[in-house]
Amino acid sequence: MKLFGLNITREKAAGYQRPDTRGTWWQTIKESFTGAWQQNVEIKQESVLSFHAVFACQTLIASDIAKLRMKLVQQDDDGIWSETKNPAYSPVLRKPNRYQTRIQFFENWVLSKLQRGNAYVLKERDGRGVVVRLYVLDPTLVTPLVADDGAVFYELLNDKLAGVNDRIIVPAREIIHDRFNCFFHPLVGLSPIFANGLSSMQGLSIQDSSTMFFANGSQPGGVLTAPGHIEQDTAERLKAHWDASYTGKNRGKVAVLGDGLKFEVMAAKATDSQLIEQLKWSAEVVCSTYHVPSYMVGVGQAPAYNNIEALNAQYYTQCLQILLESIELCLDEGLGTGETLGTEFDLDQLLRMDSATMMDVLEKSKGKMTPNEQRKRLNLGPKAGGDTVYMQEQDHSLEWLSRRDAMPIDPPAPAEPPAPPANDNAEAEAKAQASKAIIEMMKGLA
């Protein structure tokens, strides 16, 4: 069949190897500890995603990446990368597909990677072979395959949004595969849920227990005891009467006990089980697996120092940088931009400084940036004469300083200046005096 103008095979998966044949780990039940499945302790993807720390970490990372503007950059002869436009790449970066904006597209990309460990992006090409559309696929409908000769293919199941109407197998050149945490197979990434799933389920269990406790009017469960032996029918009748009269909407009513009956609390108090500490610990474990500072999702105290730039830089280096650079590299290879063209996220929106710090940095950039470049950082237009780098008068060029340093330490003394030429008037006067003296001498001899 044809998909986006390409001939795609529909043959059976014979001759291909699935990642699970390399080991028995993939697409199997992953137990949090030995025997967990038999004890009904299981980690469900949907339940884990509803835990507040998981939801907060994933949405924070995805939204912070999606809000960054994607730039097409070009390298000049001096090795400097600057933003440019190209009709072959700029349109698809600005509008990836017909139903998603740029922000929705990258948010979908990152969430797929965080939830499943893999993001699969299908390319759509025009008649020239240029990529004109990009579609983020449902990771549960994609399976990587390895041919007998080592070539990589991908099995796609029905995904109508992406234009896949049947089960097909496509070559790796038509898929952008972004993956991380490839613990068991180089083609299959692993979500952080693999590490934080048990903590998430523990946090949900704590919340469920707390919800049931407060739904019962903050009254813990207990046991009715009698001083002597009672029959089973009597015990069941007393239990039914107690549940009907003093639980649910009847909680808080006064119970009158006789015949030596006594009510004793059985449930542990929240203070005894350190409920808040356990819930906070579960959330901190989740944050650590996503490498998100816990205070950024409302867990724990924020750092005492008030330096927004430093906090954002820490968050960028330990959490976002690997995700951002992976997307940039995947797009460069997937779009085939070559060596002098590439994609780059605009980090100014992420590492934005406060106004005072920004003005201080720009003030110190004099001599390195032109006034118009400084104004551009403030989202201001250029001014006439602002394309020249200005320096103070006492500053000297590196070339001049180099020549000065090359001079000897003790230079030779300068030669005596030559005598100035004789004055023409003085010479004429001297000749006149000499002639006068000769005349006077001749008169004496006569």
Image: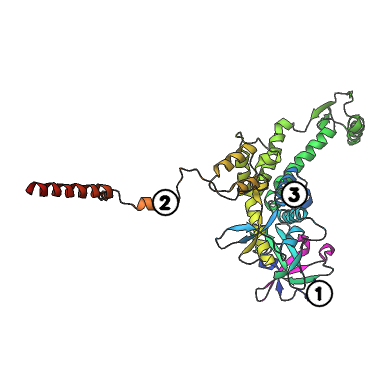
Query: At 64% across and 45% down in the image, what residue appears?
Result: 375
Between circles 1 and 3, the one closer to the viewer is 1
Of the image marks 1 and 3, the number of the one nearer the N terminus: 1
Residue where numbered disc 3 is placed: 41
Mark 1–mark 3 distance (CA, rounded to whole Å): 46 Å
Q: In which quadrant is the N terminus drawn? A: bottom right
- State the SS at label 2: helix
Q: In the drawing, what numbered circle is on residue 2?
A: 1
Count neighbours of disc 1 (C-alpha within 10 A) and say few if under 14, some if 14 to 19, many if 20 or more: few
Mark 1–mark 2 distance (CA, rounded to whole Å): 68 Å
Q: Is residue 294 magenta?
A: no
Residue where numbered disc 2 is placed: 400
The spot of residue 248 in percent (x, y) is 89, 33
Q: Amino acid at mark 1?
A: Lys
- State the SS at label 3: loop
Q: Quadrant of residue 27?
A: bottom right
Between circles 2 and 3, the one closer to the viewer is 2
Q: Quadrant of residue 14?
A: bottom right
Of the image marks 2 and 3, the number of the one nearer the N terminus: 3
The spot of residue 94 in percent (x, y) is 75, 58
Q: Amino acid at mark 3?
A: Val
The spot of residue 262 in percent (x, y) is 83, 26
Tell whether label 3 touches label 2 (CB within 8 Å). Answer: no
Count neighbours of disc 2 (C-alpha within 10 A) and say few if under 14, some if 14 to 19, many if 20 or more: few
- State the SS at label 1: strand
Magenta segment range? 135-163
Mark 2–mark 3 distance (CA, rounded to whole Å): 76 Å
347 in relation to 309, above or below = below
Query: At 74% across and 63% down in the image, what residue appears?
Result: 121
Tell whether label 2 touches label 1 (CB within 8 Å). Answer: no
